Image (cartoon, helix red, strand yellow):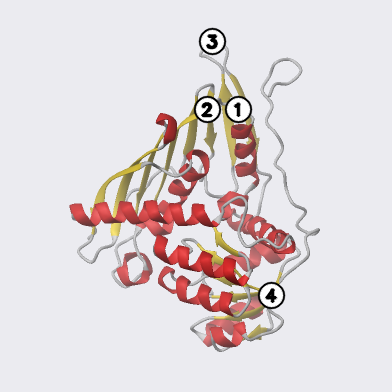
């Protein structure tokens, strides 16, 4: 798409009106990332959290009051029995997602589950099948899919601005001090780089290129089975590929690029949060460049409200899955992560963490 003088123009993001979508009454499970999501949702949308539950009742009460939520339940079953709760946001450690999501679905509640939606593709398939059978929406809280910059990228790809996409390069790694008692370093709590942050590069590759036809991975693991680093080559249809990295011990730039037959699109770091993108087309002697930047926000997690607004919109439409991140793709991304983790465990390269 070109401007009047031949310059490159980017499309505007297609956004739902956060105040124009019928609000749901939400129940939240967990006080970690759950509190960040609630702050964003209450500040930037019409959605409202009406009930909360988590393991530590005293902490839950304090966090709920701080966010204007007056009703706390002693356990998940009580929250699910609450007739004033329409939808449940599950924000607990990864290994709890399957059981809690299935319980919410069985209670007839729509459910948004923090990423990863489950610990494995098989568990994700069980959750999505249950949601379809019950006629409720089950959605992974892969918030990046619902950010404005992602919609701009989606339009750039659909309109062929950069031609056919051939390569996705993305990384997400940070240095997390070794602590065997922390969630990220505990295999029993779903620790490791892949499920926590590596899922973002894999999800981006899936959105752009689809399901991979082959997976090749190298990396390191702890003796307890926690993946510490992973470098992944995904092969896709039509000779396309993705080169992805994640780590708990390496500071990576958290950038992402899509290279195509006519140009490239670069997502601004950190690519998983509200930032922006730059598109470049043409040859070396006639490059045209255009950028889109997210308006200033009070913090990177302000973007959580976009997924909550989309979720409520899909409920109003009677959907059981997100059209931007459907059940089959959620299962496929976890199948890719399953295979990466299998290859790392089989190779058994020890990680140096202490």
Instruction: Name the element at disc 3.
Output: loop
**Of discs 3 and 1, which sits in the foreground?**
1
Residue at horizontal 66 percent and vertical 55 percent from the top: 306
Contact, mark 3 vs mark 2 (Cβ under 8 Å): no
Image quadrant where residue 90 sits: bottom right
Contact, mark 4 vs mark 2 (Cβ under 8 Å): no
Of mark 4 and mark 1, the one earlier in the sequence is 4
Q: Which residue does the numbered mark 2 point to in the structure image?
A: 164
Q: Label 3, label 1: how many angstroms apart (C-alpha)?
A: 21 Å
Q: Height in image: 297 above or below 127?
A: above
Q: Position of residue 110 (x, y in %)?
A: 63, 70
Residue 285 numbered mark, or none? 3
Residue at horizontal 60 percent and vertical 48 percent from the top: 274
Q: Height in image: 41 above or below 216?
A: below
Residue 86 numbered mark, or none? 4
Q: Which residue does the numbered mark 1 point to in the structure image?
A: 160
How crowded pointer 4 is (Cα within 10 Å; few <14, some 14-19, many 20+) is rated as many
How crowded pointer 3 is (Cα within 10 Å; few <14, some 14-19, many 20+) is rated as few
Q: Is residue 13 left or right of residue 300?
A: right
Residue that extends furthest to the top in the rendered view of this protein: 285
Contact, mark 1 vs mark 2 (Cβ under 8 Å): yes
Instruction: Name the element at disc 2.
Output: loop
Q: Position of residue 29 (x, y in %)?
A: 55, 76
Q: Position of residue 55 (x, y in %)?
A: 49, 83
How crowded pointer 1 is (Cα within 10 Å; few <14, some 14-19, many 20+) is rated as some
Work out whether residue 351 or residue 175 is closer to the camera in this orientation and state it: 351
């Amino acid at each position: 798409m070109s401007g009047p003088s031949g310059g490159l123009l980017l499309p505007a993001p297609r956004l739902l009106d956060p105040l124009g979508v019928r609000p749901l009454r939400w129940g939240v499970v967990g006080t970690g990332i759950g509190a960040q999501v609630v702050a964003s949702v209450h500040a930037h949308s019409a959605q409202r959290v009406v009930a909360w539950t988590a393991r530590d009742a005293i902490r839950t009460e304090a966090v709920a009051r701080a966010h204007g939520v007056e009703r706390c339940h002693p356990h998940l079953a009580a929250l699910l029995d609450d007739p004033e709760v329409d939808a449940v946001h599950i924000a607990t450690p990864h290994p709890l997602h399957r059981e809690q999501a299935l319980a919410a679905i069985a209670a007839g509640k729509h459910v948004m589950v923090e990423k990863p939606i489950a610990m494995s593709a098989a568990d994700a398939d069980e959750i999505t099948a249950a949601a379809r059978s019950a006629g409720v929406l089950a959605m992974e809280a892969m918030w990046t899919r619902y950010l404005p910059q992602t919609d701009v990228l989606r339009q750039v790809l659909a309109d062929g601005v950069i031609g056919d996409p051939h390569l996705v390069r993305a990384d997400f790694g940070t240095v997390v001090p070794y602590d065997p008692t922390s969630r990220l370093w505990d295999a029993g709590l779903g620790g490791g780089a892949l499920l926590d942050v590596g899922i973002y590069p894999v999800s981006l590759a899936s959105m752009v290129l689809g399901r991979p036809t082959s997976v090749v991975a190298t990396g390191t693991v702890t003796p307890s089975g926690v993946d510490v680093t992973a470098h992944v080559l995904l092969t896709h249809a039509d000779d396309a590929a993705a080169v992805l990295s994640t780590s708990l011990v390496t500071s990576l730039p958290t950038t992402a690029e899509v290279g195509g037959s006519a140009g490239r699109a670069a997502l601004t770091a950190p690519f998983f949060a509200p930032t922006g993108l730059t598109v470049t087309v043409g040859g070396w002697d006639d490059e045209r460049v255009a950028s889109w930047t997210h308006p200033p926000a009070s913090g990177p997690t302000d973007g959580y409200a976009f997924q909550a607004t989309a979720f409520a919109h899909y409920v109003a439409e009677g959907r059981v899955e997100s059209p931007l991140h459907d059940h089959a793709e959620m299962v496929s991304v976890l199948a890719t992560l399953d295979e990466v983790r299998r290859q790392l465990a089989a190779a058994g390269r020890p990680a140096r963490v202490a």
